[in-house]
Image (cartoon, rainbow, N blue to C red):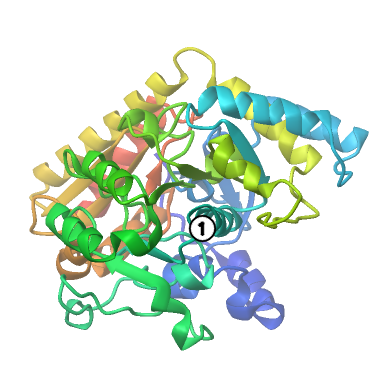
Amino acid sequence: MKTNLRNRARSRELFARAQRSLVEGVNSPSRGLAVHGDSLVMLERGQGTQVWDADDNQYTDFMMSFGALIHGHAHPTLVSVVCQAMAEGSHFAAATSAEVEAAERFRKFVPSAEAVRFTNTGSEATMLALRLARAHTGRTKFLKFEGHYHGWYDPYLTNAHSHPPQQLGPPENPKKIPDSAGIPSGTFDDVVVVPWNDVPALERVMQEHGRELAAVITEPIMANMGCILPLEGYHRRLRELTVNYGVLLIFDEVVTGFRYAPGGCQEIYRIRPDISTFGKALGAGFPVGAVAGPRAILDRLAWGNDMVLHYGTFNGHRLTMKVVAANLDMLSVEGVYQKLRAIGDSAIAGLRKVFRQRHLKAVVQGFGPMFQIYFTDRASINDYRDYCTYVDTERYSRFVQKLMDLGIYMTPANGLHWIISTAHSEKDVAGLLEAADRACAELE
């Protein structure tokens, strides 16, 4: 077990330099002082499940680039693929065999994907998905759920951050709270916001707005508030309602895709969405997104009158497509997903035992390769309002900062999630549980 890792002089020096050139010293606020506080370290290298900071402190990584590193750091197969692709030419902005190989493998994994269009990020994928839905239906309004995050496209940026419960408005008429400045006030006129995991609320809103909606977009598991699972039958009823009202169902699998099963959560929950979006684990650490669905919808991207425009110099980036194809080959090996689930379930069971033995009020939610810890009196956290009302996010942050001192790398943001990669082992889990027990002793 690693000893306390409090020597961070080099990280502090580098971060001071960073703040002179970068806003908040970072390129995404989820990496800065607002989230990490005194536990912020500058990472320099990684191998497998291990990362080292600028002071050469070593950590076991359970954040895994917010889920992008499905095979951990610097997997030798992917390193070889990248080196060869670089030597041959990383990108041409032209048609390549690499994108064909990646697309064919993608379609084998995702049953709903008659066709796929690659983008550079998950945000780009969800932007394109909404544009396709509007073009296909001839409608402009769409429904999003409280607490779900679909990238930083203006219409999606409402009710995706946690707020004090008194600011949320009544569940039957949620207040639309912008997540960013700079968004025109009329942007949300076409957005219908509904509590998630609430069938009566969904039925009521669909009865009122169903014929106006182009799409309903949902995370199949609410990953933006940690890891909140759908209640039994919820997705099935959602699919029935969208079909009844002629509304396209968009599954945003940017976080969940290629993580839980080859076909993502749509395979787990046996739901066939009209459009799906992917990212993170698809690229195994490289920037990529994807939009998939039936030809009747995706072919609207074809050049011609009334086409849905989607340009991008780096779409289908050759090096990234090589990585995607290799990644999907690695994930197709027998037993990969069973191992991911077993290691994750072992961590979840172990953490629950630690909290129980330490008499701490906490729940661990999720299964297999993604989960989250909530310090709460509740038996479970089932939606956005539960999270905003009952979760002690400050205590979670203190807990993670103590884990950092004990050699466990994780973001202190309670709205994110613990990630298990194919590189993780029971040894990594044992180290986590030992550190968690010691951190809990200091929390008591």
Q: In the rendered picture of this protein, how many numbered marks are placed on residues?
A: 1
The quadrant of the rendering that contains the N terminus is: top left
* Of the pair 194 and 362, the residue shown nearer to us: 194
Outermost right residue: 88
- Determine whether, in the image, residue 226 is placed left or right of residue 183: left
* Image vertical order of residue 116 relative to residue 25, above or below: above
| Position of 66 relative to 19 (above/below) | above
Q: Position of residue 115 (x, y in %)?
A: 61, 34
Q: Residue 263, percent across and down?
A: 45, 29
Report helix, strand or loop for mark 1: helix
Establish if 169 lies above or below 380.
below
Q: Residue at x 66, y 70 (%)?
A: 14
Quadrant in which the C terminus is drawn: bottom left
In-image side of 72 versus 255 (left or right): right
Horizontal relation, residue 93 to residue 171: left or right: right
The residue that appears at 52% across and 25% down in the rendered structure is 109
| Crowd around label 1: few <14 · some 14–19 · many ≥20 (10 Å) | many
| Residue labelled with disc 1 | 130
Visible in this render: residue 138? yes
Along the line of sight, which residue is nearer the eye, 442 or 49?
A: 49
Residue 286 at least partly seen: no
81 in relation to 21, above or below: above
Considering depth in this image, is 12 or 65 the residue closer to the camera? Answer: 65
Front-most of residues 313 and 293 = 293
Question: On the image, which quarter does residue 366 sit in?
Answer: top left
Image coordinates for residue 80, horizontal then vertical, percent: 77, 27
Q: Look at 86% across and 47% down and name the residue there.
A: 93
Residue 293, position as x, y percentages in the image: 53, 38
Disc 1 marks a residue whose amino acid type is Leu
